[in-house]
Image (spheres, grey):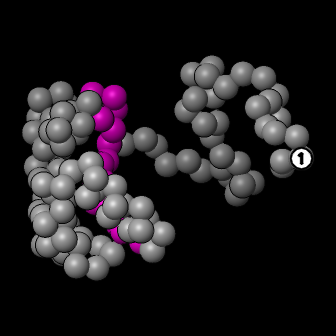
Amino acid sequence: QLGELVERAVRAGAVHVTPIVLHLRPGVREVFWPWLRRAHPELVARYQRLYPRSQAAAGYRRAVEERVRAQLRRAWARFGRPPAPPSWRGGGRGERPPAQGAQLGLFQGPPEAGRRPGMP
C-alpha cells in the first residue's frame, strides 16, 4: 500500500513525501487500544511491541522512512521527478501566492461562505 500511495503522490506532482507513523498521544491511545482489540485482535501483540511508549520504536520509524524513500526514488525513476516549486518572494510585503485550489478555481464564494454563525 505504501508503494501505491507514493506512486500516486508522485504522479500527482509531489516533490517530497514525509512518512509519519502513528503517534499514540494521550487521548488517542485511550481510543486506539480498545478499537484495535475489537477490530483487529490479531494485531494487538505486534502493536504492543511497536509502541512501548507514545511513539513507535525508533527502528520501526527508520525502517518506514527508508522504505518510503526507496519507493519515492523508484517512482521518480518511473515517472520523472517533478521540478521543485520556485521560492516565493513577496518582496518583503508579506504577500503569499494564492492557494493552489484557488488557482484551480476550486474555491467559490466569499470567504465567509460555509462558516457557522458566530464563528470567525
Q: Foreground: 50 or 59?
A: 50
Q: Secondary structure at mark 1?
A: loop
- The residue sitting at 30% across, 35% down in the picture is 9
- The residue sitting at 38% across, 68% down in the picture is 29
Q: How many marks on residues?
A: 1
**Crowding at mark 1 (Cα within 10 Å: few <14, some 14-19, many 20+):** few
Whole-percent x, y for residue 114 in the image:
76, 32
Q: Foreground: 25 or 98?
A: 25
The residue range painted magenta reads 9-25
Whole-percent x, y for residue 77 in the image:
11, 35
Determine the residue located farthest toward the front in the rendered image: 38
Location of residue 51 (image quadrant): bottom left
- The residue sitting at 18% across, 27% down in the picture is 79
Q: Is residue 35 visible?
A: yes
Dominant SS type (magenta): loop
**In the figure, 44 relative to 106: above or below?**
below
Q: Foreground: 7 or 21?
A: 21
75 horizontally vs 91: left or right:
left
Whole-percent x, y for residue 46 in the image:
12, 64
